[in-house]
Amino acid sequence: MVRKLAYLLVILAVLTAAGELCGLLLPTLSWPFTVSREMSMLNIVCTDQNNSGLLTPQGKFLWFGWVCVLVMGGLGFWLMLKGPRRFHPTPITKRRLQRFKSISRGYVSLLILLVLTLLACMDQCLVGKRALLVVQDGSWYFPAIMRKVYKGSTFGQTGDFADAEANYRELKKQAGQPGKPSLVIMPLVPYDPTGDSTNPVRKL
């Protein structure tokens, strides 16, 4: 059990770091870097903000995100090297677990909470205004899991949306029309939890 937790922590740390370096917005895993971008106290602004690199996107060093990666990976490696090989519950703990499992309402409630937690970890893949997949002229785009913001003109939108972020709900309605994407797959709930708007709010 402990070894599995250690492996899981290391894998999550690697995925989080790889996602940031590749410009991916992975559900839940990218949270430390997203927070670090939004809060000035959790990042360090470089002297030359035009000098963007792998570790300094948009001229900022996202120290909080990288600290979280190091803590998660470090804890995983520590558990591998120093942690107990197996978890051995005491006889009293075993009896308590068996008694808890015998109470069906409590046990089923725990399973439901775990399932809901896993669903919540899906984040923008379940709830969000950005499409999971857009197929345009043979090219595949994954806006929901990319930090890059695509303009409406990329997908044939004109007018106010041409220079603003693409309106994927409208693209979904227009899919298959000439000059429009052939396929648009939206999240189960195609609206952002906060700050969503049916009108273009900013230009890129």
Image: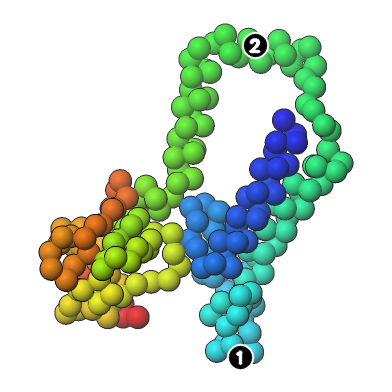
Give me the residue at 62% from left, 61% from top: 17
* Label 1 or label 2, whichever comes before in sequence order: 1
- Please give the residue where the numbered disc 2 appears in the rendered image: 98
Between 73 and 38, the one lying in front of the other is 73
Between 124 and 142, the one lying in front of the other is 142
Q: Is residue 35 visible?
A: no
Q: Quadrant of residue 199?
A: bottom left
Picture layout, residue 30 above or below residue 93 = below
Quadrant of the frame with the C terminus? bottom left
x and y, in percent, of residue 66 in the image: 67, 64
x and y, in percent, of residue 20 in the image: 57, 65
Look at the numbered disc 2 and give the secondary structure of its residue: helix
The answer to whether 87 appears left or right of 99 in the picture is: right
Given the image, on which type of amino acid does mark 2 rest?
Gln
Look at the numbered disc 1 and give the secondary structure of its residue: loop
The answer to whether 90 appears left or right of 161 in the picture is: right
Instruction: Say few, some or many: other residues with alpha carbon within 10 Å of mark 1 (under 14 / 14 to 19 / 20 or more).
Output: few
